[in-house]
Image (spheres, rainbow, N blue to C red):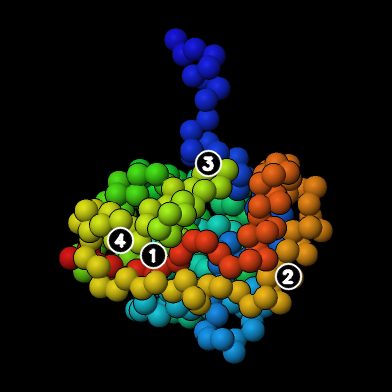
Amino acid sequence: MTSGAQANEETVEDKVVDFYDNFTETFRDIWGDNLHVGYWLDDADDAPIEKATDQLTDQLIARLAPRPGQRILDVGCGVGQPAFRLVGAADVEVVGISISSYQIGRAGERARERGLADRVTFQHADAAELPFSDASFDGAWAFESLIHMPDKEKVLREIKRVLRPGSTLVLADMFSQPDTELTFQDIITSPEMDDYRAVIEQAGLVVKEFTDVTANTLAPQAVRESIAAALLARKDDVIQMTGPEEFERMVDGVRVPKSYGYLLATVTTD
């Protein structure tokens, strides 16, 4: 029999589900449909956050280099925006997964609205226990989803299992800077950059590219102020999820340069 304390103890997975089931729509109102950071090409690029997040997606599409007819796994698909952009750029099939039932339902609705349900499907699944056969995908990517998975090596081994030999996996994720641990709501686990690469290699994957793109993810100040204003406009909704102290830290973190790093990695199964 499970004690009351044990029964009420939330796992990291439970907290991630709770956060995204309840906060996704507020996040979209503030940030747009891509639930990941933006990518600015250079100092002259003043793209708004919606365009900058698409530019990050384009960075991953270029690294994935999909070929017609391939089947691609989207690990942590959000509400499907990167997957829709991928099938718009290449004649591929995409299967997106998330542990958030809300996100899966919303992503499916959006696929049907766009007439893409025959090419993009979404499935409720845990990345650490993928419900797919061995060697059933030609490629995969993960946009800021491993950050929510404490056992990254296990997840990477599972992704490798479902990829065919010679397949490419592309990762976009945050990492902690030296002496600055990245934390939020107990739903983030982020090693430093060298440790992150070591985890990838320990999972049996071959690193082809491992790039620090932190400078490209630092939004122009005007964009920062716009996002901060959007957060303040939804203050009551956001505080329900973050609490008042975390909310103030969030707004401050938007307005000043980030304390975390950001990497893009291209790896293969062999």
Closer-to-camera residue (33/192): 192
Q: To which residue does mark 4 refer?
A: 194
Question: Residue 120's x, y, as percent?
Answer: 50, 64
State the CA–CA distance, disc 4 to disc 3.
Answer: 22 Å
Residue at left offset 70%, top offset 49%? 247
Label 2 element class: helix
State the CA–CA distance, disc 2 to disc 1.
Answer: 28 Å
Closer-to-camera residue (44/131): 44
The nearer-to-camera label among 1 and 3 is 3
- Please state if 228 lies on the left or on the right of 167 as rendered: right
Which quadrant holds residue 46? bottom right
Question: Residue 157's x, y, as percent?
Answer: 27, 51
The nearer-to-camera label among 2 and 1 is 2
Q: To which residue does mark 3 refer?
A: 186
Closer-to-camera residue (166/46): 46
State the CA–CA distance, disc 4 to disc 2.
Answer: 32 Å
Q: To which residue does mark 1 refer?
A: 171
Which quadrant holds residue 49? bottom right
